[in-house]
Amino acid sequence: MSSKTGLTLYTAGTPNGWKASILLEELGIPYHVHAIALAKNEQKEPWFVRINPNGRIPAIVDHDEGDLPVFESGAIMIYLAEKHGKFLPTNTRSKAEVISWLMFQMGGLGPMQGQAAHFVKFAPEQIEYGIKRYTNETKRLYGVIEKALSDGRQWLAAGEYTIADIANFSWLYVHQMAGITLDDLPHVQAWMKRIEERPAVRQGIDVPEPFDKAAMQDPKKVQEAIDMVRKFTGTHKSEL
């Protein structure tokens, strides 16, 4: 058992990694950061696979709970929110609403947008079927959020800011990487602005290293990022 206290976050600067770091910043609890070098496939090394058998980021180890490992970003969010009593309601109805929107991101938005980004930006060849299939589905999912927010609500679920907002925001924050704009989604844009203005969100996005959102508008820097991803994935199967 480790002599450390608190918890350690194993992460990288991706939407799934931000889900954990933003929540930790919102909770205001101290934590150690171990930046995982995706370019070196550190997430596949035996020591990390003992923490997360699936070899993906993020993961945490809660040293105050006997070095308890928790993996999968959604599971981490639920664990931390429940343990610290914030950002996840305790009453049955509200909690169900939040978990539903969290699973919407886990099972729909994240996987579909991830595949859209792969076919649009990272695939070694342009495959029209893959591009249309995943960008269209991602746009449809964006539309689901837009419709939900169009009823006047400020947040996705339970009438308050929760882990559901953090999870979905983290992916929409990099919508450009999937070649999708938010121009026709005014309610989504307003919701994202409310979230991005939160100091903890900005701090969480800069874990484990500062993220330059403006660089996403620079074709040269975007291409450099694409080349880096293609280099370390090798088979072009994204590990993000």
Image: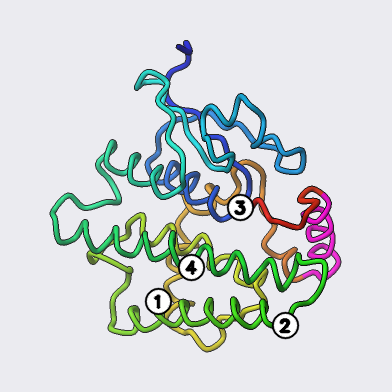
Residue that mark 1 sits on? 145
Relative side of 172 to 43, left or right? left
Q: Position of residue 104 (x, y in %)?
A: 39, 66
Would you place residue 27 above or below residue 130 in this image? Answer: above
Q: Is residue 143 left or right of residue 114?
A: left
- Give neighbour class at mark 3: few <14, some 14-19, many 20+ (Cα, 10 Å): some
Residue 30 appears at what percent x and percent y?
A: 45, 30
Judging by the rendered image, the residue that carries numbered circle 2 is 128
| Label 1 close to label 4 by CB (< 8 Å) | no
Give the residue drawn at x 53%, y 28%.
32
Q: Quadrant of the N terminus?
A: top left
Magenta highlight on residue 80: no
Identify the residue under disc 4: 109
Which of the two labelled residues, at mark 3 and mark 1, occupies the earlier sequence position? 3
Q: CA distance from mark 3 to mark 1?
A: 21 Å
Left or right relative to 159: residue 18: right
Of mark 4 and mark 2, the one earlier in the sequence is: 4
Where does the image place residue 165, in percent across and percent down from the top left?
39, 62
Question: x, y percentage for residue 7?
Answer: 45, 27
Q: CA distance from mark 1 to mark 4?
A: 10 Å
Q: Which residue is mark 3?
A: 14
Say which element carries label 4: helix
Q: Amino acid at mark 4?
A: Leu
User: Residues at badges 1 and 2 in contact (C-beta under 8 Å)?
Assistant: no
For residue 211, above or below residue 21: below
Separation of residues labelled 4 and 3 (CA atoms): 14 Å
